[in-house]
Image (tube, grey):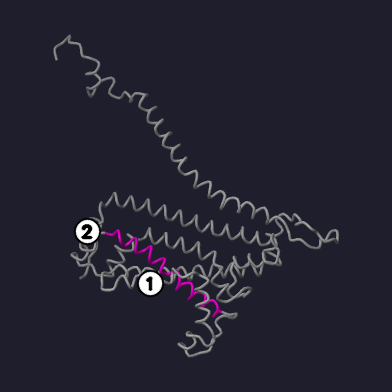
Amino acid sequence: MMAGTKVPPEAAAARPGGRDNKTPAPAVHRRGGSRATAGSGRMAALLVSPTLLVLAVVVLYPTIMALHESLYGPKGLDPRTGFISTTEPFVGLQNYADIFGEAGERFWNAFWNTTFFTVVTVGLETVIGVAMALIMHQAFKGRALVRAGILIPWAVPTAISGLLWRWNFNSDGIVNTLIGHQVLWTTEGFHAKVAVIVAEVWKTAPFVGLLVLAGLQVIGKEVYEAARLDGASPLRQFWHITLPLVKPALLVAVLFRCLDALRMFDLPYVLVGAQKTSVETLSMLAQNEASNVRFGPAAAYSVLLFLYVFLIALGFARLLCADLVDGGGKSRRHGSGRRRTMTFSRRTEVTA
């Protein structure tokens, strides 16, 4: 460029060493972008508001009323005045304090029964449900009939399922005929727990299988073809390909089953009966208190059950979100499913 020639401001800004090379974008665009973001946020809030309103009416209001009711005691003889009280007296946190006192034994028994049923049934349902999903995912003759047969128990109402298994567990029922012993399954004892677990797993394992099957449907066949070409055995394919890729769907299934099992009421109530120490759950305990017009203690048990379920759901939600975020990072690092399989096969020595 000749000396003395004037450089236009636009050219100076475009040059690498130009003074205006780091000039920020005009403020008009930033204001326009923030305005568009605010508009989309308002639209999203408007679309979600009906759901939030329904949840507030169906969930939030009953929860607040249960918490309020748990602060009152049952009607009856007022120990201070000696007269019959026609209104529920305000007792504060006394209903919660009684859990660690005179009413504590029954509460903790129901709490451990609920936890035991949840852990055992959900564990068995996860294993059996995954096996069902793998069977339903295979291509063979009569697959539609097998799928329908597996899913039928889940479609049966819980009360009907309880009556069906009560008939099976009778003293002269099918179960005693098969084992060759006379066991009173629907009475007190550990065998009553076994009866509830068998009936619960029979009914709800297909639900886990259905959700896992949905996860299996989205796995591309080329992933398994690449693994077979590299000599991976079926067990190694299942452990290193199938399980990691269906993990989000499996976690959702386990979450739903845990929340449902923690609220277990109708199956043990119909199958074994009420006020049975061996199978009494927190829901059954709250219902029994309410049926005896002790609404304050019943509300206290319900609030504690709500907190228990909420903590379990919160833990699963954090685990599920962390898994999804981690899965997204792995996908960005390794690319498609086929490339991830090839990377694994190059890193690991695979035997045919």
Name the residue type under label 2: Met
Q: Residue furthest top?
A: 4
Task: Name the dominant secondary structure of the magenta segment.
Answer: helix
**Percent of width and height locating residue 205:** 42, 69
Q: Which residue is mark 2?
A: 342
- The quarter of the image holding the C terminus is bottom left
Q: Which residue is mark 1?
A: 150
Horizontal side of 85 relative to 186 (left or right) equals right
Give the answer, above or below, for where 191 lies relative to 325.
below
Tell us which disc is closer to us: 2 or 1: 1
Q: Earlier in the sequence, mark 2 or mark 1?
A: 1
The secondary element bearing badge 2 is classed as helix
Quadrant location of residue 98?
A: bottom right
Residue 314 belongs to the span the image colors magenta:
no
Instruction: Give the residues in magenta.
Output: 190-219
**Residue lying at 71% horizontally and 67% vertically, measured from the top left:** 102
**Percent of width and height locating residue 119:** 49, 68
Name the residue type under label 1: Ile
**Looking at this view, is 131 or 3 the one in front?**
131
